[in-house]
Amino acid sequence: MPIDLNADLGEGGADDVAMLDYVSSINIACAWHAGSAGEMLALVTAARERGVAIGAHPGYADREHFGRREMQLPPASIRSAILYQVGALEGIARAQGARLSHVKPHGALYNQAARDPALAACIARAVRDFDPALQLVGLARSALVEAARAEGLAAIEEGFADRGYAANGHLVPRGEPGALLEDEPAMLEQAVRMVKEGRVRSRDGSEHTLHVDTLCLHGDGRHALSFARGLRARLEREGVRIGPAVGAGKDRGR
């Protein structure tokens, strides 16, 4: 199986289109936490031309905090938010002769769903009801991955090349020391270990075992393009094949 390199795009990154030359899938902001219809159209068009897999990146309607502020919303609100945002991007993709392959929640919605089974189930059901052929991306070994499989969806387990890991195996919250990896050698070491050894080291030095189908790089990061170029080159030198992820369903062995 190949490893997928994905990037969150349409969030104000200066090198979004250039990133497409190094990744195999993208998650496009659906104009709630960031982005616009015009950016969605441009990225769908450019990704289709390059054969890059296209996914929706829905988040909370909270542009002031970039969708990174946790909220407690009723299930009906979460469901409608997912359906609305995925539907908007799907409509643009269809008009351009493209199709969506996956959904990856953004920011606080993603991180809350990683640890909250009820929220994770709400998201997974909304994706299933929209299109059961869509894959759902979640943090490796998280509640969102389990919810996807419980709803019969193919789940893509995600690792982060440019984010630090906490002692519980989840991501270090933004704003805390170690949340972002700014050093390219450290980013490359973490990414290669996840892919080839299935392990990641947390900021306290503890080790965690995890399976990853895809590695994420943030398109709005200061080193986004350099990191993407370097990571692809390093993985290819290591003999790792790069390609869009194919998630596993509820019957996959753990």
Image (spheres, rainbow, N blue to C red):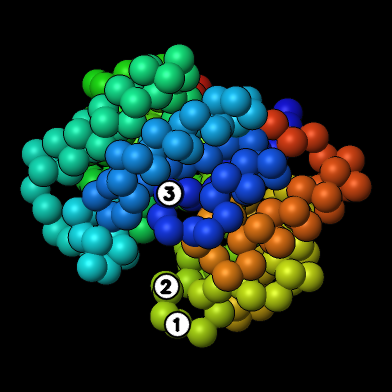
**x 24%, y 49%: residue:** 32
Tell me the crowding category of disc 2: few under 14, some 14 to 19, or many 20 or more residues within 10 angstroms, Cα based. some
In the rendering, at what x and y percent does residue 120 appear? 30, 43
Q: Quadrant of residue 164?
A: bottom right
Identify the element where label 3 is drawn: loop
| Residue lying at the far bottom of the rendered structure | 177
Q: Which mark is residue 173?
A: 2
Tell me the crowding category of disc 3: few under 14, some 14 to 19, or many 20 or more residues within 10 angstroms, Cα based. many
Identify the element where label 2 is drawn: loop
- Return the residue at label 1: 176
Kindly check if marks 1 and 2 are in contact, taking CB atoms under 8 A apart as contact: yes
In the rendering, at what x and y percent does residue 37 appear? 30, 39
Alpha carbons under labels 3 and 1: distance apart: 25 Å
Q: Which mark is residue 10?
A: 3
Tell me the crowding category of disc 1: few under 14, some 14 to 19, or many 20 or more residues within 10 angstroms, Cα based. few
Instruction: Tell me: 225 left or right of 13.
Output: right
Identify the element where label 1 is drawn: loop
In the rendering, at what x and y percent does residue 253 appear? 58, 30
